[in-house]
Image: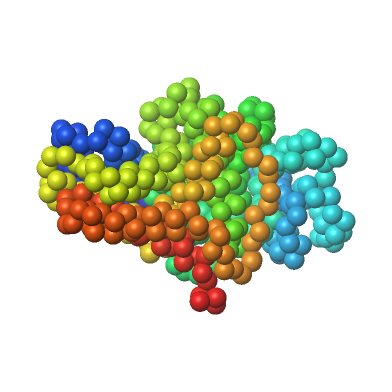
Amino acid sequence: MNFVYNMNPFRRLAIITFVTNLIYLIWLLFTKSNPLFVILEAGIILLTFVFIFNSRKRKYVLSGGPHSIRPIVDIFLTIKNEDIKLFEKTLKSATEIFYPNKRIYVLDDGGRKEVKKLTEKYECTYLSRENRELLPYKAANLNYGLKNAYGNFILTLDADMQVNPNILDELLGFFKDEKLGFVSTRQGFDVDRDDFNHENLFYEYMQTGKNSYGVGISCGSGVIYRRSALDKIGGFQEWNIVEDLCTSYVLNSSGYSSVYVSQSFTHGDAPTDLAAIYKQRGLWAQDTLRLLIYKNPLFRKGLNFSQRMQYFEIGYSYIVSGLIFPMIYLMNIYSLLANDPIIVLGKEWYLLLRIPSFYISLKMFSSFSKGTGSMKMWAGLFPIYFKAFIKALLYKKPIYKVTPKGLKPRKNIVLVIPQLSFLISALGAAFFHFFHYGLTWVLAINAYWVCVMMYFMSMVIFKAFPKKTL
């Protein structure tokens, strides 16, 4: 088993970020300021602190070594209405895995004849549920596979993710640890190098941080599960539609550890069209927020404090983007229009302390994102995450729909109306304030937040205007 602990590249920037934000927060708590604004600012800083705490120790795992027992491994390929050509590439790659005791099952929730024909072509087992309309969820499809398969381990693959032929030989060795429930791997995407879908911040820092505490979460495809562990918790979890996160959560809180491997054993397409991005990210957010609200990890038995914080971070990040940021934006627009100061005393100190602390926080997240702008995308998707939060409060389980991939980015101004409305309103309020009240501290403080707003929303807005349509 090969692994390495890596803290040094992270430590310096994290310490500076923590100290500058802590100084600002302490100052803010002891100044006469708008209470709601203080709460919202504290909420933003809390996410930064949680990220630093969760990522302060990171464990990079490369491989688990060969498994000498050579147990039977069932490979589940789930498909609903994904492109048949993409699926054939995935199926072919699965048949080329170097492992003697593998059995490949195609779990077709679309009931398509062409999928069955393709399965027969590659001499694999075809399974399609009769009651799929009653439970139209991926977890139910996977559980149907469990009922019809008997392997010691389960490898799950999405229909559009091709797999490395060495995946089983490289990873099965981890399961020498009898308390290991599953092994998760990084997903690779065939998109531009600087595309946010690479999720460097998540894979390089959040996942490796979780790995240090034995709770690296499943990413759905390219994940190997211990069959007996799944049986103990009743199979793949159907309460959430995002079965990978919820199943990880239940396995970890049931006493099973997990390992995240910091290299990709699968690769495929990722959505680049803004409508598809909204659909995918909104679904992830809604289901993750349902988990945070109704099965809050802070109170979950079976997890220690650090493990609870690792799961809390995932859902709380959507709260910050979907609720806290837009509330601050609205407060600043109101403050400009009404000439109502957010900071009453020590206005100059606010700018002197907040601008550096916020800049360093952005520097940290941007640096760890490796130029992909994943933080800007996360913050700019606040309307989608706000909508997801409202739906999550209603406890409604979202309907599973396959995210379209491979679509060329299309121009769609309608999708960014909320972001544009905030920007236009903020700029309008700033000009209104200047012409009615002149150069004031209210204008200076809120102009800072207008700049923050423009920075965060720029990436999503540009996505609505692809280069070919400009």
Query: In terms of depth relative to the viewer, which is nearer, 422 or 407?
Result: 422
Residue 176, x across and y down, in percent: 55, 39
- Left or right: where 59 falls relative to 283: left
**Residue at far front of view:** 436
- Residue at x-position 23% and y-position 55%: 436
Q: Residue at x 48, y 24 (%)?
A: 300
Residue at x 19%, y 41% (from the top left corner): 343
Nearer to me, 22 or 145: 22
Q: Quadrant of residue 314?
A: top left
Is residue 13 visible from the viewing direction of this image? Answer: no
Callout count: 0
Q: Is residue 208 left or right of residue 43?
A: right
Relative horizontal placement of residue 429, taking residue 251 as reference (left or right): left
Q: Position of residue 150 (x, y in %)?
A: 75, 38
Q: Is residue 104 left or right of residue 349?
A: right
Tell which of 334 and 223 is nearer to you: 334
State the image quarter where residue 323 is shown: top left
Q: Is residue 71 above or below residue 455?
A: above
Q: Image height check: is 61 above or below 225?
A: below
Image coordinates of residue 43 in percent, x first then y, are: 33, 38
Query: Nearest the camera: 34 or 319?
Result: 34
Residue 321 x %, y %: 42, 46
The residue at 52%/48% (across/down) is 384
Asked if one can make out residue 391 in the rendered structure from this viewpoint, the answer is: yes
